[in-house]
Amino acid sequence: MRWKWITMVLFLLSLSACGSPEPQAMLESPTEKPTDAVQKATEKAALTSNLICENPPPEEIGVGAPVQSEIDDPHWEWCYWIELPAGLSSATFHLDGLSADLDLTLGYGYVEVLQYAFGEYWRSGESGTTPEAIMIENPVAGPYYIKVGTAGPKDPSPFSVSVTTEPETTADVTGAPLPGHDRCERPAQELGLGEAAQGELTDRGGTGPRSRDYYCVQLPDGLSSVTVDLSGLSGFLEIFVRHDIAAEWMDRDRQGDARSVTIESPDPGPYYIDVAAAVAGTSSTYTITVSGK
């Protein structure tokens, strides 16, 4: 018994020498649940931490001006963006000068198209060191995002990226900042709450992705819900809405002449809306309305 008592005394003395925990720290519960804001921020960070084209972000390039670079550790992918002018009959995106197997991917409108391979998205994946090329006929004006990445084993390789057009043209970089996540950005048409807009989606033909129209609404804080309505359809259309990640809400119904998406307790900020052709060859008129309460 005496030895047990001595052992206990020595243990307490050692705690005193090392310092005891703060009383408040001892009282805090390690299982305390985070607030909704913290939880949402944590979930968003987990979703976006490993996305392509984030670190480093896309670099702007000019029309008709080749850019030289190299795939190597630690960067096994590089992203670029370019602003195409209106009135082109075609634009061709080139990837040349390879010593390893690389792929070329392309997305229109937003960098999220590349990150989630969703929307107006193209890919060229020739085997080996064969040059890659993607040609778009009658391209819509606006920002296009380009990714160069390894197609198989992570083998270093030099490469050259360039964009040529018909009619032939050149254009310097615009110097415009990358579209952010805190406001509505091009190529989306911004809508106000309670505002309606008339649109017509036309079939662009060719073998590329199906055509889309782009809208955005900037939501204030404190809304209990927001609803996006698509009405008066004359063809098969669908709608996709995103705030943080691609296609968070959608209506892909193929019945009737209306579509609708309602978001409960939306966070403030920009919400992007894609009006998309549901099947190849679709053309349709429509009215889009965004309402909140």
Image (cartoon, grey):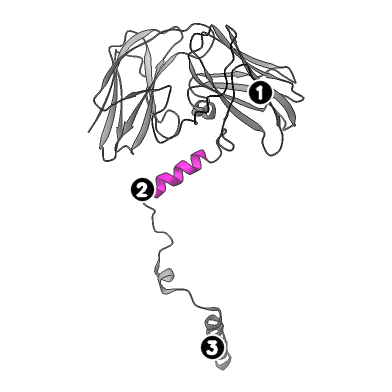
Q: Residue 283 carries which label?
A: none
Q: Give the range drawn in magenta.
A: 38-53
Residue at which label 1 appears: 103
Mark 2 and 1 residues: CB-CB less than 8 Å, in contact? no
User: What is the three-letter code of the residue carrying label 2?
Assistant: Asp
Label 1 secondary element: strand
Residue 15: % across, % down: 53, 80
Label 2 secondary element: helix
Quarter of the view holding residue 162: top right
Compute the Cα span from label 2 to label 1.
40 Å
The answer to which of marks 2 and 3 sits earlier in the sequence is 3
Does the magenta portion include 161?
Answer: no
Residue at which label 2 appears: 36
Residue at which label 3 appears: 9
User: What is the three-letter code of the residue carrying label 3?
Assistant: Val
Locate the C terminus and report the quarter of the image it occupies: top left
Residue that sits furthest to the right in the current view:
99
Classify 10 Å Cα crowding around label 2: few (below 14), some (14-19), many (20 and above): few
Residue 25: % across, % down: 43, 69
